[in-house]
Amino acid sequence: MSLRFFSALFALAAAGCGEDYVRIVIEGSAQDVSATPVGISISVYGGGEATRYDYTDTLETRGSNVPSSDSVVTFSDGAPSRVVVRAKVTTPVTWGADTKLSLPAEGSTVRLQISPGERDVATNARFDGGDGTTATVFRGGLAFAWATLEGLKVAELRQPDANVSAVTRERLLTSDPGVSHVRIAARPGTSTFASDSYAVAWRDGGLETHLVIVDSGRTSSTLSLGTSDDVQLALARPGLAFDAVAVLRKGSVLEAQTFTIDSSGEPVVLATPTPVLQSNPVDQIIGVVTTADAFVVGARSAEKTLLAKSGPGGEGYLEATLDGQARAIARSIDGNLVFLANDLGGTLSLESHFAGDLAPAGGFARFGKLPFVPEHPRARVSISECAIAWPEIRDDGSGLVDLRVELLDDNGRPRSSPVYANIDDSGDHYSPTAVCVSPTRAYVAFFAEMPDNPVTGTLRVRRVPSDLSLSASNTE
C-alpha cells in the first residue's frame, strides 16, 4: 500500500491519473477542534500492511456547514480488498473516528465525524489476568474498581462527559497487593439507570473472597465469603426478595450466595448458599445477572454454555444447555431478556433468551472474529444492556490489540456501526467493561498496557459515539 499525502487545496487535482485513491475528510464542529490549528494523524491499514501520516490544520468550513480538513491516500496495485481508516485529532482532549473501507476506493470520499476519545481514570492500574470488571453506573455517572500494586482502589466520576470533571473519592478498600478477580456492579433502577448503590467483590492473595457495599455514599464493612477460585457479582432492582448475589466457583462447583442490604448499608446473608449447575462440571463462570424476580448464572464447560435460573433459596430453579462457548452475559433494560455473547467457532455472536424460562427469544447477531481462545486473559468480551465490546487484533502486521464497541437496542440487536473504543493506537488495549447510563448513553472502560510491561498500565474510559447509524454510510 503506497501513500501520498496532499493538502486540502490540491488534494483532488494531485491524485495521479488511473490511480486508486480515497479522499479522507475529518469533520468536527466543537470549539475544541475548530478554533485553532490541531494535530491530525491518519492511519490506513489492512492485510498486514499499514501507512500513516501526520499534519497540522485548522478545521474550517469548506463548502459545507461542518468545519473539516481533508487529505488523499492513494493505493498501489495489490492493496488489500478491505482497509481500516482511523483518525486522531490532538487538542488538550484527544478526538477520533474510524471506518472500514472496501477497495478499490475509486476516488470516493470518506467522512469521519470525530468524537471525544478516552480519558485516564487511573495510571497505576494492575492487570492481574483475573478478567476483572472495572466500571459500573453510579448516580448518573460512573464508579470504578481496580487492582493496583498497593491493593484495591475504587473511585467515582460524576460527570464523565465534562472535560474538566475529575475522578473523585479515590480510596483504598484493601491494602493487600495480591488482590485479583475484581468485580463491581450497581443496583439497576426500576425504570432508569440511576443507582445510589454498588457492590465490589474481590479475591485476596490468600484466595479468600470479600464483598463491600457502597450505599448512598456509605461504605460497608468487609464481608468474607470464604475461599474460591472465582467470583461474579450482581445487584437486584428495588423490591425483590434479595439485594445482591455473589456466585463463587470452587473447583468445578458453583454456589450462589444472596444478601440483603440493611438500613445502615451493611450486607446481610439471606440464606444458605444455593448450589448451581450441580450436574455439570464448570470450567468458568461467565457472570450473573438479576432479572424481574430471580438471578441467572452463565457458565462454561469444556464444550458447552450453561445457564441456570434461581431464586434466593433455590426456588424456581431451572437450567439450559447451549452450543458454543459463552464469553459474557447481561440483562435487557427491563430485565425480561438475558443477553449472551457467545463464541461459535471463533465468531462472536449475541443471543437473547427469555429470563422466565431461558428459552431462545429469537435475537441473534454476529459481530466479528475473535482473536483469542476464551481462556486467554486478554480475550475478555463485555456486554451490557445497550452495548457490547470485544478485542480485535490490528490488521497492520503489528499484532497489537484494539477494542471494538457497538451499541445495542432494547432487544440486543445492533443499532449503530461498530467503532474502536481506543483512539490511542500505541500498545495493547483490552479487558473492556461496557456500561449503560441510559439507553443511548454508553461507556466502555478498558486497560491500556504500558510499553514493555504487561502487568501495569492505565485504566481508561470513553463514551461510545451515539450518532453512528447502523444503516448510514460515511463513504460517498
Image: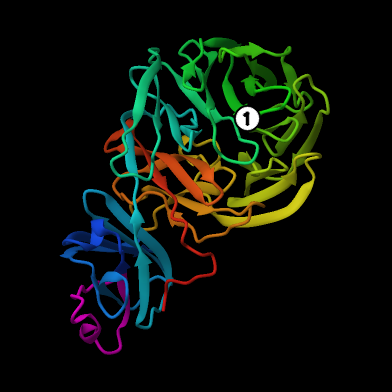
Circle 1 — which element?
Answer: strand
Location of mark 1 (residue)? 285
As rendered, which of 344 and 138 lies closer to the eye?
A: 138
How many dots with numbers?
A: 1
From the top left corner, tell me how far across and down residue 253 is, in percent. 69, 21
* Residue in view at x 83 percent, y 28 percent: 316
Q: Is residue 261 above or below residue 390?
A: above
The answer to whether residue 11 is above or below residue 46 is below
Left or right placement of residue 73 versus residue 359 in this view: left
Report the side of 348 relative to 313 (left or right): left
Residue at the (37%, 45%) spot, across then down:
161
Q: Quadrant of the N terminus?
A: bottom left
The residue sitting at 61% across, 54% down in the picture is 409
The answer to whether residue 461 is seen in the rendering is yes
Image quarter of residue 127: top left
Picture layout, residue 415 above or below residue 209: below
Residue 17 drawn above or below residue 175: below
Q: Is residue 114 magenta?
A: no
Q: Magenta stretch mostly in which secondary structure?
A: loop
Residue 317 image position (x, y, % from top left): 81, 28
- In the image, the segment drawn in magenta is 1-25
How crowded pointer 1 is (Cα within 10 Å; few <14, some 14-19, many 20+) is rated as many
Circle 1: residue type: Ile
**Which residue is at the front of the view, 348 or 246?**
246
Which is nearer the eye, 390 or 281? 390
Give residue 50's quadrant in the image: bottom left
Q: Residue furthest bottom?
A: 17
Rendering coords of residue 458 (x, y %): 32, 35
Q: Position of residue 465 (x, y in %)?
A: 43, 55
Task: Decide which of 294, 12 is in the foreground and name it.
Answer: 294
- Look at the image and tell me whether residue 47 can be seen: no
